[in-house]
Image: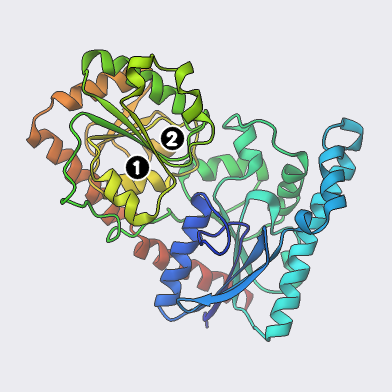
Amino acid sequence: MLKKILFLTKEYHHPNISSSGGTGVFYKNLAENLSKRGYEVWVFGSAKKAVDFQENGIKFHFVKDFFRKNKSKEFFRSLFGKFSYSIPWHNQLYVQEKKYIVDELQKYLSREKIALDIIETHDWDGISLFLEQTKIPYTVRFHGSWTVLEKIFGYKNVPPGKKYCEQLALEKSKNNIVISKISKTINEGIFHISNPQLIYNGIDSHIFSNNEKNSKIENSIFYFGNLSKEKGVETALEAFNRIKKDVPNCTLHFVGKTNDYQSKLIDFLPKDVLKDVFFYGSQSFSEIVNLLSKAAVVFFPSKGENFSLALLESLSLSKIVICSDIPAFSEIVKHGENGFIAKDIEDFHAITLKIFQSSTEQISTIENNARNTVVENFDISKMTDNTIQYYQTIISEII
């Protein structure tokens, strides 16, 4: 009988642990939903500092990051990664890190006398490399590994040790969850996983419900997500520059981690346009709802994704989204029905102009379709149901 569940993760969205991206938000949502349903939930991992606390019925225990704890190994990890002849030593330091995490997990479970039914962890970093030593059933959810980000989506400067551990860990992982059809295709090809379970990520559509008290900012474009070249921030800036010439009162709003782009704006936009660009940084869920409720259009110009919670959150808020033409987006967005797909910068320009000129009735139809897409297919309760069913399948096969 499924009762006790642990998430092994290097990322969790909580101020006591660390700032996080989509994986951390995902595990926060899933852990809290499972706890509300009466399951006993633990979250274990490594972070900048060790923490141990309980909140909302969930028990948290994070040990100090291996390389922060061992400064000499951090030094050699960095040094060995710079030269081809020393890469094997570099890789082995990452293997030691994975062994450290599982050793610490086993100590914790033994000390607290916890008898788990299942463990879930993520694909990136190959954190599951030694999990079989716990003798506890486990599943890996493929949020997006460093190997995939480099090979498929063009990410640069990925430490070889991370990819090495991913390859070792994921080739032997037997119970796998993929989060989109494109994720399934990619990971079957790279890691040779077989019969993965497709479970789309979900969000709480009750939380991400449009705040009608916040009226739309006329002709406003919002970008929701971390600002990076890979996420398409430069596409957004160039499209905005073109739109601005046709719609002088157009404004651009960035919600997400800014990285260095706020200081680089002068490289992309004329000085007279800069006054209409606004940065809000990373925000809480409630503030994201308040901000995005004001958007006329939300851009998602990413060059590559496995899946996007930010896209679901925007759709759930009944926003008109314009997405780049990549498989992970086109699985969700049907052009002209619940949003729009843009093939290039000119498409982002032309589609935005068309939206700004559309009637209220046309806009409302697409906004309603956007919201219904999430409520019917991507709500967190459906994702949680599917996850529980898969956990039970794994456990029953072992019994």
The residue under the point 27% across, 17% down is 244
**Could you tell me how far apart the alpha carbons at marks 2 and 1 are, in whole angstroms?**
9 Å
- Name the kind of residue labelled 2 in the image: Pro
Judged from the image, the secondary structure of the residue bearing numbered disc 2 is helix
Residue 341 lies in what quarter of the image? top left
Q: Which residue is mark 1?
A: 332
* Closer to the camera in the image, 185 or 13: 13
Residue 1 vertical placement versus 10 (above, below):
below
- Name the kind of residue labelled 1 in the image: Ile
Q: Which of the labelled discs sits on residue 121, or is there none?
A: none
Residue 352 vertical placement versus 23 (above, below):
above
The percent position of residue 86, horizontal first and vertical second, equals 90, 37
Mark 1 Cα shell of 10 Å, populated few (<14), some (14-19), many (≥20) = many
Q: Which residue is mark 2?
A: 327
Residue 201 lies in what quarter of the image? bottom left
**Colour pattern of the rendering:** rainbow
Q: Is residue 27 visible?
A: yes
The percent position of residue 51, horizontal first and vertical second, equals 63, 69
Mark 2 Cα shell of 10 Å, populated few (<14), some (14-19), many (≥20) = some
Quadrant that contains the C terminus: bottom right
Residue sitting farthest toward the bottom: 113
The percent position of residue 53, horizontal first and vertical second, equals 57, 75
The residue under the point 11% across, 34% down is 362
The number of numbered discs placed on residues in the rendered structure image is: 2
Residue 160 vertical placement versus 14 (above, below):
above
Say which label, 2 or 1, has the lower sequence index. 2
* Closer to the camera in the image, 43 or 274: 274
Residue 295 lies in what quarter of the image? top left
* Closer to the camera in the image, 258 or 97: 258
The residue under the point 33% across, 16% down is 272
